[in-house]
């Protein structure tokens, strides 16, 4: 490892502990729909589905399933990273209703990641913050990869969010072709737009996209990006996403400045060697865990504590998790 990077990681780790404490949250995005009216972001799974799913209504998840998933996150003490849906996949009134009901289930307002919208004044305390899916802030690269997703539109949305008193977040994907020099763009964007939370993902190469044969970014490159952001912005919340085939990234990302870890297939990994590995990575980084990937007693009964309408989905989640073995 580069000696200077090692020193920076150590400095970042101490700063994170001082500013944010020693607890790492397990995070899960709850998807509302599998459709997006743009559907042309080069890395995205939805870009492979637009011509397959003609009717966006059919791409919506069942409401009861969404609420059941929120109830399971509450039982397992997982944070809901945000409610996610492709651009214009669900009307504002329904998103507000879903967010309000999830707030009743979890006791917390939720973040939104629903594309660019100016309907933010329709929301209230059920929403904690608004997420802009920026993905990459290199302007030339962004135009190539997300041709229909204008950064200016995202920035305008975040400005309106600030005016309305909502927190602001962005997502960034590493491994799209950017370089470490592009950090200057990112630092400037965070500073200019007073971003409260940043969520990093490593590229997940999907079949049928131009990235299908592309490798995921190197762990130390990922670490260097996170370290730089932590040192530049001590108070910002940093969530890092990694995939089931890259769990060894977790420890170094925590030491680099992450407050939370995300992007896992929760119910497939719960109670397995992979779930155990996630917890080991966190513990070996000398951190406590908010949430569990291994304690099956937290799964609770095979029925909903909220509404019998969610029972069949709760039963499926609990049974699937109970059958998993290390």
Image: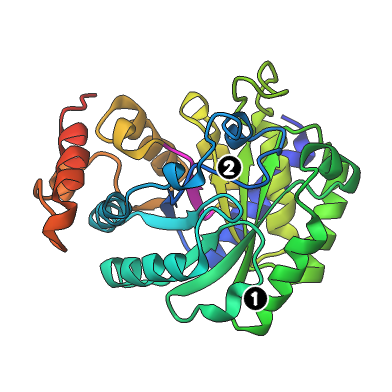
Label placed on residue 161: 1
**Rendered view: 254 above or below 210:** below
Q: Residue at x 68, y 16 (%)?
A: 213
The residue lying toward the viewer, choosing from 192 and 227, is 192
Question: The residue tagged with tag 1: helix, strand or loop?
Answer: helix
Toward which corner of the image does residue 277 lie, by quadrant?
Answer: top left
Q: Residue at x 85, y 45 (%)?
A: 182
The colouring scheme, among rainbow, by chain, secondary structure or one colour, is rainbow
Quarter of the rendering occupied by the N terminus = top right
Toward which corner of the image does residue 22 lie, by quadrant?
Answer: bottom left
Quarter of the rendering occupied by the C terminus = top left
The residue lying toward the viewer, choosing from 179 and 257, is 179
User: Residue 155 location in percent, x, y?
Assistant: 76, 65
Q: In whole angstroms, how far apart are the C-alphas of marks 2 and 1?
A: 29 Å
Q: Residue at x 52, y 55 (%)?
A: 259
Name which of mark 2 and mark 1 comes first in the sequence: 1
| Residue that lies at the very extreme toward the front in this rendered image | 55
User: Residue 131 location in percent, x, y?
Assistant: 61, 61
Boundaries of the magenta span? 259-264
The residue lying toward the viewer, choosing from 24 and 130, is 130
Toward which corner of the image does residue 233 lie, by quadrant?
Answer: bottom right
**Rendered view: 236 above or below 200:** below
Question: The residue tagged with tag 2: helix, strand or loop?
Answer: helix
Label placed on residue 253: 2
Q: Residue at x 12, y 50 (%)?
A: 300
Horizontally, is 218 left or right of 303 in the view? Answer: right
């Amino acid at each position: 490892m580069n000696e200077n990077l090692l020193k920076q990681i150590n400095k970042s780790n101490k700063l994170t502990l001082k500013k944010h404490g020693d607890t790492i949250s397990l995070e899960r995005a709850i998807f509302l729909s599998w459709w997006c009216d743009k559907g042309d972001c080069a890395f995205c799974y939805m870009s492979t589905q637009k011509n397959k799913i003609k009717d966006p209504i059919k791409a919506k998840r069942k409401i009861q399933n969404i609420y059941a998933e929120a109830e399971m996150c509450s039982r397992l003490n997982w944070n809901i990273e945000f409610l996610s849906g492709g651009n214009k996949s669900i009307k504002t009134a329904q998103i507000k209703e879903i967010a309000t009901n999830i707030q009743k289930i979890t006791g917390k307002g939720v973040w939104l990641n629903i594309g660019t919208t100016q309907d933010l004044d329709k929301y209230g305390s059920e929403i904690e913050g608004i997420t802009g899916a920026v993905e990459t802030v290199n302007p030339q690269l962004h135009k190539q990869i997300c041709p229909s997703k204008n950064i200016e539109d995202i920035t305008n949305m975040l400005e309106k969010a600030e005016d309305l008193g909502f927190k602001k977040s962005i997502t960034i994907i590493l491994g799209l072709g950017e370089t470490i020099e592009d950090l200057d763009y990112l630092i400037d964007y965070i500073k200019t737009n007073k971003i409260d939370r940043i969520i990093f993902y490593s590229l997940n190469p999907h079949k049928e996209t131009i990235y299908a044969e592309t490798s995921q970014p190197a762990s130390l490159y990922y670490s260097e990006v996170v370290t730089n952001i932590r040192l530049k912005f001590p108070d910002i919340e940093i969530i890092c996403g990694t995939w089931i085939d890259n769990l060894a990234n977790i420890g170094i990302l925590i030491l680099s400045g992450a407050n939370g870890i995300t992007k896992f297939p929760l119910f497939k990994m719960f109670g397995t060697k992979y779930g155990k590995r996630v917890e080991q990575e966190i513990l070996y980084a000398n951190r406590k865990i908010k949430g569990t990937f291994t304690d099956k007693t937290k799964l609770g009964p095979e029925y909903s504590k909220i509404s019998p309408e969610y029972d069949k989905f709760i039963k499926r989640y609990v049974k699937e998790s109970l059958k998993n073995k290390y």
